Amino acid sequence: MSATPPAGRGSRPRLRAAGATAILVTSALALSGCVQSQRTESGNGGGSVNSTFVFAASSDPKSLDPAFASDGESFRVSRQVFEGLVGTKPGTADPAPLLAESWKTSADGLTHTFELKKDVKFQDGTPFNAAAVCANFDRWYNFKGIQQSENLAYYYGSLFKGFKDKPENAVYKSCSATGDAQATVTLAKPFAGFIASLSLPAFGMQSPTALQKYNANAVAGTADSPQLSEYAKGHPVGTGPFKFDKWDVGQQIELSSNDDYWGDKGQIKKIIFRVIDDANARRQALESGSIDGYDLVAPADTQSLKDKGMKVIQRDPFNILYLGFNQAKKELKDVRVRQAIAYAIDKDALVKQTLPEGTKVATQFVPESVNGYNKDVTSYPTDKNKAKELLKEAGYPNGFTIDFNYPTNVSRPYMPTPEQTFTNLSAQLAEVGIKVNPKPLKWSPDYLEKTQGTADHGIHLLGWTGDYNDTDNFVGVFFGHQKPEWGFSNPSLFDELTKARGVSKLEEQTPLYEKINDDIMKFVPGVPLAHPAPSLGFASRVESYPASPVQDEVFNEIKLTS
């Protein structure tokens, strides 16, 4: 899908925005005085560290209830307020204990027993215990009607496959409080990525008291245009280091330090997530001092910010940028045509000319750090003559013309400059006789609806930032079943992916995914292009920032000098 937004894939379904989010460059800069006032009021004075941190968000969150969210801006806020049973090891996508201090999994992969952290309370004073854990699991399983839609329970539906009223394919079975600090979750079928998936903000632990008090499940509207509950608009309650204070839709969200937090509270006492939807405005706001940081620095801005004394921090790439093929189009049904396009592309040139420093060329649809990465995968080194030969064999000696869909006015972690990427690839394809009809389209919701929900597109640019370290979170998302994006049905591949997903022993699962990754590249549903390295920009007072490849970044870990 982080899948993100700044987290995650652009193709994940989105809740519709709750209000206008546009803030122009001039208005962003005009806020500087207000922000400085807020900082002064909340600071400690006497030369102490300024304790208000202002971060520029690209949009409003779509929901303050992470169970009903899938976008990066929602998750950025969620990670401050909520915590899951499982977190990630610093600087990696690998699972690590959080609210669960440890866990044991049965040999058959169906029973998971969690030993919980003791003496933890939700921000409303409700005890965090095994009963609260089971209340959360049972809440997700009992979603009904539009609550189950992809626009709401995207992650639960995608990963756990079924709900109580539709249990045929459901992965979850039950949860029991086997002690005040011990919860046992039983699955109906093995899911190798279960533990790792719990690091997603969508599965953060929420106060059962607040969920009930503020009618968290009272979602109105339709599946295509849901209306948020009272809870999701203004009463989120977790166990995290920051608690929710205020949401001025289209303007900003304010959080403050949770005085009763069980862990390190850190230096920051107040967070302001300010909505600035224009990339240039975010950069200028940082340069003016009205914000402390922002995500997705444009590659062209990196050196300029450094020259002005700002800090630019890179996340390790945990993503994939790809050129997708819609096999509903006649030309793309022929594997020789798909292979020809793969041979026509010079990925090294693409990376050098259009993508940020630190980007790695992709050979397959998973990063190198993910289980099942195949170093011997079928590859297509740049070979223009080979591409022309394949096109001739396929009946296109003079090439052909195809629609090329790409998004505009957007920057994603895996696709920082889509217009430049489109221009570069179009020129490369022209060298082998493939001409393109440019089909630019506004990112959300138009581009996603066109490429993900219809057959009316050709070759197209998209990508994905991994949510957690599991192969299914990449290739399973893309190719686990028939989708309009790709326009093909491949039951053999679908079955392979379903089987691998349920194998709980890593030593048995790894060769399955290695074969799957090679099978995918032989089938060539698209061309994996690169693993771009996303960048964040910060004011000089930010000494360190806990950059995470899956954006698991909690602001109590930020170190400030002033």
Image (cartoon, rainbow, N blue to C red):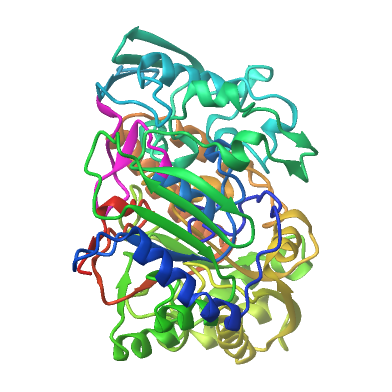
Q: Quadrant of residue 398?
A: bottom right
Residue located farthest toward the top when viewing the structure as drawn: 178
Q: Is residue 52 left or right of residue 77?
A: left
Q: Nearer the viewer, residue 328 or 396?
A: 328
Percent from the top left, x then y, of residue 313? 30, 72
Q: Nearer the viewer, residue 447 or 304?
A: 304
Magenta stretch bounds = 81-102
Q: Is residue 112 left or right of residue 119?
A: right
Percent from the top left, x then y, of residue 40? 35, 66
Q: Nearer the viewer, residue 224 or 453?
A: 224
Percent from the top left, x then y, of residue 1? 55, 52
The answer to whether any part of residue 279 appears in the image is no
Q: Nearer the viewer, residue 168 or 229?
A: 229
The residue positioned 71% from the left and 33% from the top of the image is 219
The residue positioned 59% from the left and 83% from the top of the image is 26
Q: Quadrant of residue 217?
A: top right
Percent from the top left, x then y, of residue 305? 36, 85
Q: Is residue 212 left or right of residue 404?
A: left
The answer to whether any part of residue 290 appears in the image is yes
In which quadrant of the rendered image does the C terminus lie?
bottom left
Relative to 425, residue 66 above or below: above
